[in-house]
Image (cartoon, rainbow, N blue to C red):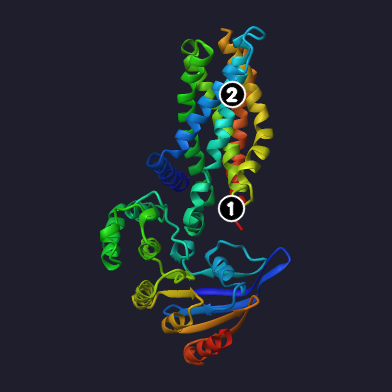
């Protein structure tokens, strides 16, 4: 579903990724931990096609159109309403208008966007904005969800809601895969089926389901960072 | 090709909707145009040089400055909430992003020029109405080339510090050929000379448009990829 094969990248003389190789099958959720500057966001960007690596290959089954991207910013236009934003992103992903409207209504219901669907994004709270960002990422019904530190700045309630949404996405069908980059070890280990740790651009740990419990690796990382 | 243009239109429509919603860009550019014309009007000695000799240069210098101001905001819109990242993850062809921006910038700048032209006629007492049709054609012809180069360069400087300063420094040298052509043709129009005298300049403007729209469309993907 997602793969990286010998991926290397650097920013000038500073190495960002060193020979990263892994595959993530459908139905799995990988939580990726690592200290600041470890290369987590760079790896996500390589997978999403935002960065062309200096060496190696990486990709997602179905290409860019299969990806739902959630960052710590909403990627929404502040002066447009949530509805206008969702229509715009749906059109960009070539979702047919009638499907777009029906999906918009479904997402509005699931994410409780109704009260602020016709409000400008600039007037929303951080939690509301993040819910709208999730709707934006799901409007084209992606099969792969890439989340880059989505819990940043969210209070406990909003973070818990977001966790439920990610869980809902992962549980919606076996044909889906998720990578979650986060510093929040509790949220990450709760959601993940697999846990990876990046350190100085290297994937130093990867615990796939069945070989070692993901929770063990999570615990070790938790101890390392605390 | 159809998909490319369709995506470009979706993007252009979004940019224009944002402008209609905020009006900050258009109001700033129109006020700026009025101020530049005022400065030129009071900063010249009418007894030293005839208005008809100065007017073409004043018109095009004013449009150039207003254009640089307008182009600065083209990609600034995409920095809000990192929307540019979302656009680059989406499956659209990078070239449609350029063509969408080109289209929106063109509409925006032509609107500014449409408001600026009557102000120019008022300030400098030039009989614009007598040559309105060929002058409008000339403005469109020169503006297409201007916006083609400006849109590419505004994408190039978007991640650079002092982008507002870098854009004119990079852009103005490229604008010298069309600016000379536009001033020459305008001077002939204002002095009632036949268009057959400036066919060479019109051909140059047309060639400039074709070359730079094609070249910029091809080069644009390299400017936005990390």
Q: Is residue A23 visible?
A: yes
The C terminus of chain B, quarter of image: bottom right
Where does label 1 land, which residue? B224
Q: Quadrant of residue B174?
A: top right
Q: Is residue B91 visible?
A: no
Indicate the position of residue A174 as horizontal and vertical percent values. Answer: 38, 78
Q: Residue at x 45, y 25 (%)?
A: B115
Which type of secondary structure does the marked residue at label 1 adopt? helix
Q: Is residue A54 left or right of residue A154?
A: right
Where does label 2 land, which residue? B60
Q: From the viewer's side, name the closer residue of B183 and B122.
A: B122
Q: Is residue A204 above or below residue A117?
A: below
Indicate the position of residue B21 as horizontal and vertical percent values. Answer: 38, 42
Q: Quadrant of residue A68?
A: bottom left
Question: Residue A169 bears which disc, if any?
Answer: none
Q: Is residue A26 above or below residue B54?
A: below
Which of discs 1 and 2 lies nearer the camera? The answer is: 2
Report the Cα–Cα distance between label 1 and label 2: 30 Å
Which type of secondary structure does the marked residue at label 2 adopt? helix
Judging from the image, mark 2 belongs to the subunit labelled B
Classify mark 2: residues with Cα within 10 Å, few (<14), some (14-19) or many (20+). Answer: some
CB under 8 Å between callouts 1 and 2? no
Q: Is residue B163 above or below residue A182?
A: above
In the rendered image, the residue lying farthest to the front is B42
Q: Is residue A108 left or right of residue B100?
A: left
Indicate the position of residue B199 as horizontal and vertical percent values. Answer: 61, 17
Q: Quadrant of residue B146?
A: top right
Q: Residue at x 52, y 30 (%)?
A: B32
Q: Are labels 1 and 2 on one chain?
A: yes
Classify mark 1: residues with Cα within 10 Å, few (<14), some (14-19) or many (20+). Answer: many
Q: From the viewer's side, name the closer residue of A77 and B146.
A: A77
Judging from the image, mark 1 belongs to the subunit labelled B
């Amino acid at each position: 579903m997602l793969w990286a094969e010998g991926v290397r990248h650097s920013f000038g003389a500073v190495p960002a990724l060193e020979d990263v190789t892994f595959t993530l099958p459908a139905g799995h959720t990988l939580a990726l931990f690592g200290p600041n500057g470890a290369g987590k966001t760079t790896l996500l960007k390589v997978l999403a096609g935002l960065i062309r690596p200096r060496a190696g290959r990486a990709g997602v089954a179905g290409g860019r159109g299969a990806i739902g991207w959630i960052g710590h910013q909403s990627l929404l236009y502040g002066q447009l309403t949530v509805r206008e934003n969702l229509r715009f992103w749906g059109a960009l992903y070539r979702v047919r208008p009638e499907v777009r409207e029906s999906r918009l209504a479904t997402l509005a219901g699931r994410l409780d966007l109704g009260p602020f669907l016709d409000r400008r994004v600039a007037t929303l709270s951080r939690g509301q904005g993040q819910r709208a960002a999730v709707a934006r990422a799901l409007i084209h019904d992606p099969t792969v969800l890439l989340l880059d530190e989505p819990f940043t700045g969210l209070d406990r309630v909003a973070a818990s809601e977001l966790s439920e949404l990610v869980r809902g996405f992962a549980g919606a069908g076996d044909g889906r895969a998720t990578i979650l980059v986060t510093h929040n070890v509790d949220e990450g280990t709760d959601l993940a089926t697999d846990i990876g740790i990046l350190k100085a651009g290297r994937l130093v740990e990867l615990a796939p389901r069945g070989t070692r419990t993901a929770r063990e690796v999570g615990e070790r990382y938790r101890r390392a960072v605390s | 090709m159809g998909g490319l243009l369709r995506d470009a239109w979706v993007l252009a429509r979004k940019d224009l909707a944002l402008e209609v919603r905020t009006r900050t860009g258009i109001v700033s550019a129109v006020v700026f145009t009025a101020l530049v014309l005022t400065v030129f009007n009071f900063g010249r000695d009418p007894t030293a040089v005839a208005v008809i000799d100065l007017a073409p240069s004043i018109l095009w210098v004013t449009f150039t400055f207003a254009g640089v101001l307008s182009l600065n905001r083209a990609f600034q819109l995409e920095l809000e909430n990192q929307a540019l990242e979302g656009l680059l993850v989406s499956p659209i062809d990078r070239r449609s992003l350029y063509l969408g921006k080109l289209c929106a910038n063109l509409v925006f700048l032509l609107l500014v020029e449409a408001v600026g032209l009557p102000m120019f006629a008022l300030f400098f007492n030039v009989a614009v109405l007598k040559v309105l049709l060929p002058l409008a054609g000339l403005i469109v012809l020169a503006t297409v080339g201007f916006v083609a180069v400006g849109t590419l360069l505004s994408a190039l400087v978007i991640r650079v510090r002092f982008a507002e300063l870098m854009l004119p420094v990079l852009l103005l040298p490229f604008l010298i050929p069309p600016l000379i052509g536009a001033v020459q043709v305008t001077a002939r129009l204002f002095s009632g000379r036949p268009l057959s005298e400036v066919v060479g300049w019109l051909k140059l403007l047309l060639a400039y448009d074709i070359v730079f729209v094609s070249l910029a469309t091809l080069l644009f993907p390299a400017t936005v990829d990390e």
